[in-house]
Amino acid sequence: MDFNKIFENNEKWIASKLSINTNYFDQLAKGQAPEFLYIGCSDSRVTAEDLMGVQPGEVFVHRNIANQVIPTDTNVNAVVQYAVEHLQVKHIIICGHYECGGVKAALHPSDMGQLNSWLQTLRDVYRYHKDELDHIMDSQHKFERLVELNVIEQCMNIIKIDHVQRSWYKTGYPKVHGWVFNVKNGKLIDLQLNMEKEFSAIRSIYDIKPEG
Ligand code: CO
């Protein structure tokens, strides 16, 4: 794509928004009150707003390679804190996707420079579930299962975060959801995780406000 085409596209987009509502950008500039925090992969094929069919102002978005929630990553922690404390989002979504290059790399050990440390947490997910994964003979199926297990693990990492737990104790929100986007057919799959149940199982280890 021609670089300048992007600015032409932008002008067309402005015109199309204004043709429907002449106050569109005045309203947009007033502020945001999204109900969703979406944490997904940086992959160019997995565009959060497009696949959810939502408009500017409706989703707070964080993307990184293979949708990781790493406890020492100040970036993701700041996003989660801001979304939970200030925007008071009702839902946090971790969205993985099939054909994820990051997940694929984690299945095949090699020296990838700066990516080594980033992919280490993904390799850890493989290690936690090695028995299950190594019993899957079909390599594509194994790849897709690691995508799903990574989403589950990152949802677990979300519920360990103090900001999320504090908000739970105060308001009962946010709800945490694990999704997978199937790039081969465009389908969004809800993994139907019960993160409240998951939290009660690990509470004795990770609860910041233990009972008693
Ligand atoms: Co990816």
Image (spheres, helix red, strand yellow):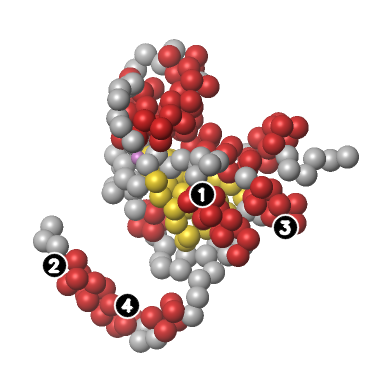
Determine the residue located farthest toward the bottom in the rendered image. 22
Residue at image coords 51%, 49%: 74
Give left or right: position of 87 versus 6.
Answer: right
Task: Name the N-terminal-most of marks 4 and 1.
Answer: 4
Residue at image coords 47%, 61%: 59
Horizontal and vertical percent for residue 85? 63, 61
Please say if the residues under marks 4 and 3 sit with CB atoms less than 8 Å apart. Answer: no
Quadrant housing residue 15: bottom left
Residue at image coords 39%, 54%: 48
State the separation of the CA atoms marked 4 and 3: 36 Å
Q: Which residue is mark 1?
A: 74
Please say if the residues under marks 2 and 4 sit with CB atoms less than 8 Å apart. Answer: no
Nearest-to-viewer mark from 2 and 1: 1
Residue type at numbered disc 4: Lys
State the separation of the CA atoms marked 2 and 3: 47 Å
The answer, for residue 188, to whether it is visible in the render is no
Q: Residues within 10 Å of mark 4 (few under 14, many from 20)?
A: few
Q: Which residue is mark 3?
A: 171
